[in-house]
Image (tube, rainbow, N blue to C red):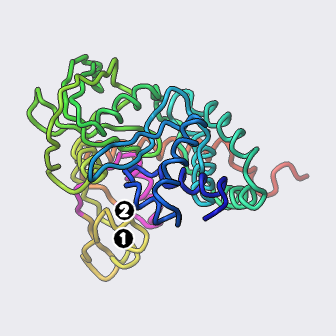
């Protein structure tokens, strides 16, 4: 490669990957001599890129963090991925990230080639995020501290407020941050409780890394996302539900979520459903009503009461908006 500017861009692209590159390997990649690589490294340093060199048989070059951020070199796929991610960040639950995302996206799209701007716009127009309005905002600095502790395997201290408002101080070995789309959670080993725990990040206060390193423990089950999902399921109160339907089991099963279980036939045109669930009674009541047949709730009593109140509200609403009788007002 004889084009010096093009070679420098290729070299920079290689150095921006998170690894150390031996000089001989860089020379082979770019088709030049190790001496040319040394000169090109000096040119990058003159341009403000902090390239670190290590000596010895396994020494090499790598790009490190500097006092200022020099320009990045992105390939087409990386540029599109960053632009789409910034657009998604404009509606995220991280406090203040919307404005920062817009500023960064504006700068990026100003320098994107037209072909890439078209790809970003096409992808954005063809997708829509499913967002919820009940997620608490999170200070980006809190996430930054936690992410650094996870990556650096450093123990973390913070104040934590539980769902009932109880304030406690925790020291943990952070494992992973997990985003559900509207909330952030930290999966960590709690040293005080001697057990794995999940923490809502919006309830964390004053987190700081202690500097004490640790050897990561093996998570009891699956990955962090699966562990969080199971943990959240265990926290939900479970309710025993028993309902009889005046319809064939096949009819009812086709109109109920599979998660509620399969109804058992009790006759040619009747069936019974017995299930243990952690869903809200409101949701269960609506699902039962949507089966579109007569049914009787045997338990729990609170579901029966809710259905009674719901039926009364619906009746009042229907009465208040009922159309006048046929022929009314005609002489």
Give residue 295's mark: 2
Which sits in the foreground, 308 or 199? 199
Q: Identify the element where label 1 is drawn.
A: loop
Distance CA(mark 2)–CA(mark 1): 6 Å
Q: Which residues are magenta?
A: 274-295
Which sits in the foreground, 67 or 198? 67
User: Quarter-wise, where is residue 116 in the image?
Assistant: bottom right
Give residue 246's mark: 1
Q: Is residue 17 left or right of residue 59?
A: right
Q: Residue furthest bottom?
A: 268
**Callout 2 crowding tier (Cα within 10 Å): few <14, some 14–19, many ≥20:** some
**Residue at screen point 61% across, 51% down:** 84
Q: Is residue 8 left or right of residue 252?
A: right
Whether 184 is drawn above or below 270: the answer is above
Q: Is residue 160 left or right of residue 107?
A: left
Where does the image place residue 263, in percent across and percent down from the top left?
Answer: 28, 71
Q: Is residue 140 left or right of residue 154?
A: right
User: Quarter-wise, where is residue 131 in the image?
Assistant: top right
* Residue 288 falls within the magenta-colored stretch: yes
């Amino acid at each position: 490669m004889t084009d010096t500017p093009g070679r420098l861009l290729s070299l920079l692209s290689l150095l921006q990957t998170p690894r150390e590159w031996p000089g001989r390997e860089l020379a082979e990649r770019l088709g030049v001599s190790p001496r040319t690589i040394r000169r090109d490294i000096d040119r990058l340093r003159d341009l403000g890129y902090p390239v670190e060199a290590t000596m010895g048989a396994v020494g090499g070059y790598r790009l490190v963090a500097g006092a200022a951020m020099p320009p990045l070199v992105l390939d087409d796929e990386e540029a599109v991925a960053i632009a789409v991610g910034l657009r998604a960040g404009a509606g995220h639950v991280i406090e203040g990230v919307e404005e920062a995302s817009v500023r960064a996206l504006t700068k990026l799209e100003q320098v994107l080639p037209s072909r890439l701007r078209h790809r970003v716009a096409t992808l954005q127009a063809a997708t829509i995020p499913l967002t919820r309005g009940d997620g608490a905002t999170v200070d980006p600095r809190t996430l930054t501290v936690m992410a650094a502790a996870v990556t650096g395997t450093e123990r973390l201290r913070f104040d934590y407020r539980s769902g009932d408002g109880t304030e406690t101080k925790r020291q943990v070995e952070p494992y992973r941050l997990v985003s559900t789309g509207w909330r952030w959670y930290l999966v960590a080993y709690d040293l005080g409780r001697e057990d794995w725990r999940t923490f809502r990040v919006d309830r964390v206060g004053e987190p700081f890394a202690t500097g004490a390193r640790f050897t990561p423990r093996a998570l009891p089950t699956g990955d962090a996302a699966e562990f969080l999902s199971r943990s959240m399921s265990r926290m939900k109160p479970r309710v025993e539900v028993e309902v009889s339907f005046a319809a064939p089991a096949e009819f009812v099963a086709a109109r109920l979520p599979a998660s509620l279980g399969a109804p058992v036939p009790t006759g040619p045109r009747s069936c019974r459903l017995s299930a243990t669930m952690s869903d809200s009674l409101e949701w269960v009541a609506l699902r039962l009503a949507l089966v579109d047949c007569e049914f009787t709730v045997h338990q729990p009593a609170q579901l029966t009461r809710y259905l009674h109140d719901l039926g009364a509200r619906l009746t009042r609403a229907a009465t208040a908006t009922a159309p006048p009788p046929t022929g009314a007002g005609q002489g």
